[in-house]
Amino acid sequence: MLFHTWTFLLFFIVTIAGFWALRPTRFWLHWILLSSAVFYGWWHPYYLLLVFYSTALDYFIVGWMERGPRLVRPGWRFTASVVALVGSVAVGFVTPDGWGGLAVAAGFFAVILAVGHWLRSRRAWLAVSIINNLSVLFFFKYAGFAIENLNTLLARLGAGQLPSAESLMPPGWEYVLPVGISFYTFQSMSYTFDFYRGAIAREPSFVRFAAFVTFFPQLVAGPIERAKNLLPQFATFPRIKWPDVTDGASLFLVGLFKKVALANYLGLYVDRVYGDVASQDGAALALATFAFGWQIYFDFSGYTDMARGVARCMGFRLMLNFRNPYLAVSLADFWSRWHISLSTWFRDYVYIPLGGNRVGSLKLWRNLLITFVVSGLWHGAAWTFLIWGALHGLGLIANRGLEQVAWWRDRCPRLAKRLVVFAFVCFAWVFFRAESLGQAMEILHRIFTTGWADPQMPLLLLLLVVSVWVYQWVYESPSRGWLEKPPVKVGLAVAMILWMLLFAPGGGEPFIYFQF
Amino acid sequence: MTHETRQPLASDSAAVHLSARQWLCALGLSLGLAWLLPVAWPGFEAFEPVPHYRVPYELSNDYWLYERWLDQLPPDAIPVVGDSMVWGEYTAHDGTLSRHLSDATGTPFANAGINGLYPLALWGLIEHHGGALANCRVLLHCNLLWMSDPEADMQLEKEQTLNHPGLLPQFAPRIPCYRADTDTRLSRTLERRLEPLSWARHLQQTYFDQKSAPEWTLADDGKFPPTYPNTYRLPVGVEGMPLSAESPSAERGLASERHKPWSANQSGQVNMEWVTPGSSLQWQAFRRLAKRLQGRGSDLLVVVGPLNEHMMNDATREKYLGFRSAVAAWLSEEDIRFVVPEVLTSDEFADASHPLTEGYERLARRLATGPVFRAWLGQ
């Protein structure tokens, strides 16, 4: 179910009515859970099995973790466990067809749960949670990519081929990437990590924990919430005040406009150019890449705004996920403004455990590169995403070097810095948007080697994007007060509503980030 | 993603935060403008239908224009409602049934048909956009061809690409071959109930080549390599399609290659399965439509057929006549006046149900001399 559809509007009316009606009882939380199940199951009912599995697993693991000692020296038990795990995976590859795959998966999970009980320690349970969550994520998101690349390698070595990921599915079950699996898996894992680190207490109520993981506004594309922020909000029925409703509606309106009026419009131009790279020249490809930068921003931040708006109308506050990222003056600044919930997730659970920036230069560079390559892979199973992540990692390293240069740090105009960051981010977007590494290279090659004729970007589109950029610019300037004047705000809201009513292209285009 | 990252604040977002009072103002203004614009729009857009006007083929999906056409019919004009048989699939706008009825009776008849309709969609058109057809005389054509086999009757489960899907019943009764998702159905339901949405569709149909304004700015000229004529144009001051008269078309009219008897293309007779009146979705829709028009106080006359019986083999004709008898029986039962005209000659049909210009002329003359029709006209 997409936010910008009439179906969602009906769903939300029913949900909010039930939510409000149940406020004197303790069942409002069950209602949220049920609504979230309907919202998610709308895509495909079998998705529910996966989200339920992830949720239940982390809920119980944290329970077991609470009872276990921090560390038990495993000795030979550890070796035996690793052998059992590898063995169960190997069995999967020799009995690939039909129910064999499911049976092996069940066996694999049973083995690692048994291993957890056997090893008992908190650290073991943390490992079980990580392996379990990442295995599910790996199977649905990366198995195809990994097997394809391994088979290419095996073919070169003259060895046999591995079975396809599709063949491991039970008969009649389609091998599809469950919408939002990366988001809820990370959210659920963050709870386990935080508990392990002692940052939060165990949540005793399964319903509350399940509501936290599956809360429908943020289930499929974030923000990736932290238990510390969202779980306490589910402790009691929220006190919903008028500003919650009006702010929520405002967020929703802006998000809807970003998606329906801006992202979808930009998408039409980007698809036209990227859909026929061979006949485009440098100017069209460069402009389409800039357009894609804005498209993905409007698409994703639009979704987040709507998610935050919906939650806010119900009295819940989700974290800010975007903060005018194209006004960033450095790449580090960009990552503090872009997909904040994910970048802070990687910061807290990957970058800092690796040593963060309190290490020597070489290790720092390594940490940045690892973090960003993993972040790139989080977005998708393809070499293009890996390179996109690596580029950002390298960009951050270069950025740190640049910050040491006095002229750049103190005298370079902020506008120039913004343009450099924007240009770099767009350069990296080429890899993100291209269908393959070959296409990305072809796009870059054509940008720099072919002529620059009229790119045929609609004037209306250009005006819209420039208007938003100027708006954001003013918003971050001392003149921000102008934008907060009631006539301006009301005028903007009216303009957005009328634009969507009269001009928005029809059709509920899915959000780009759903594929992650 | 470094330790320097500061905790973001909600106020960092550039969202437009409106207070309750500001929301009231914004919604009031938006809704007011959305309802006012369609009302005021006729003042900015000339619409002076030519004699024997019909809604142009290119604007068949412009239901807002259809409403406007009905709204400005002269009070003494009698609308003729129906599908492409009424609209005139093979004829020019001045060769249709309504034009010949006007000539034959001296009473003005108006072509209130739309190309591409069928009873299930016709019901939607009249239900949602035919509010002007109240307390007046209405001539309603019943084209039985839509009941001649399960596919035409839309009973098959196989998905079909349909004309006018926005006019179909979206949720009930269930139409097996109509497979839109829930959101499309909801959005179509809303579009036909909310005039601003219907007017927005009118703008798209008339000014933006049946696209949304953003899509229009990106449209190519259909050639290879493509060029993009609207790239630097803004969606204001665009010259629209002519509303008041249809553009000359090589597809229709006496000079058209298509305007020839059916036997010139195919001489063989065909077998039609026919559905039963009890199971027919199209016939049920027609009955709802007739009752709806009656309910609005319209003085209804139904013209049943004629179909091209020359195309039918004996078995098919027998089934057709059986269905037609059932239709006549129901109309009698409901006290709805009806006429079952004699079949036209073979040369006067262009296909199974559409007459040629001469066919319309003969049909109009026959109707005009019939006692039921004359009584209905008050002559």
Image (cartoon, rainbow, N blue to C red):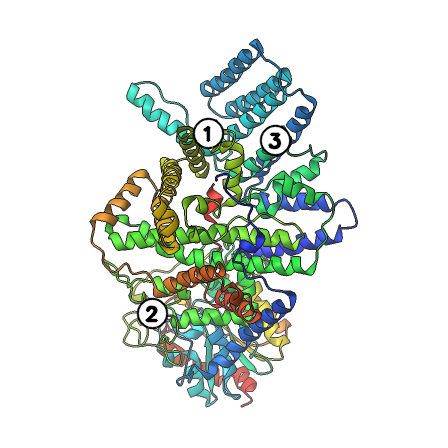
What secondary structure is found at the residue carrying circle 3?
helix
Q: CA distance from mark 2 to mark 1?
A: 56 Å
Query: Which residue occupies 35% across, 48% down?
Result: A408
Residue bearing the label numbered 2: B233
Of marks 3 and 1, which one's residue comes earlier in the chain?
A: 3
For this rendering, which residue is in front, A347 or A161?
A347
Q: Chain of mark 1?
A: A
Residue flagged by tag 3: what amino acid is it? Answer: Thr
For this rendering, which residue is in front, A46 or A415?
A415
Left or right: A230 with respect to A349? right
Residue flagged by tag 2: what amino acid is it? Answer: Arg
Give residue A359's mark: 1
- Please provide percent x and percent y for residue A423: 34, 50
Q: CA distance from mark 3 to mark 2?
A: 55 Å
Q: Give yes or no for contact between labels 2 and 1 (Cβ–Cβ under 8 Å).
A: no
Residue bearing the label numbered 3: A192
- Please provide percent x and percent y for residue A384: 36, 38
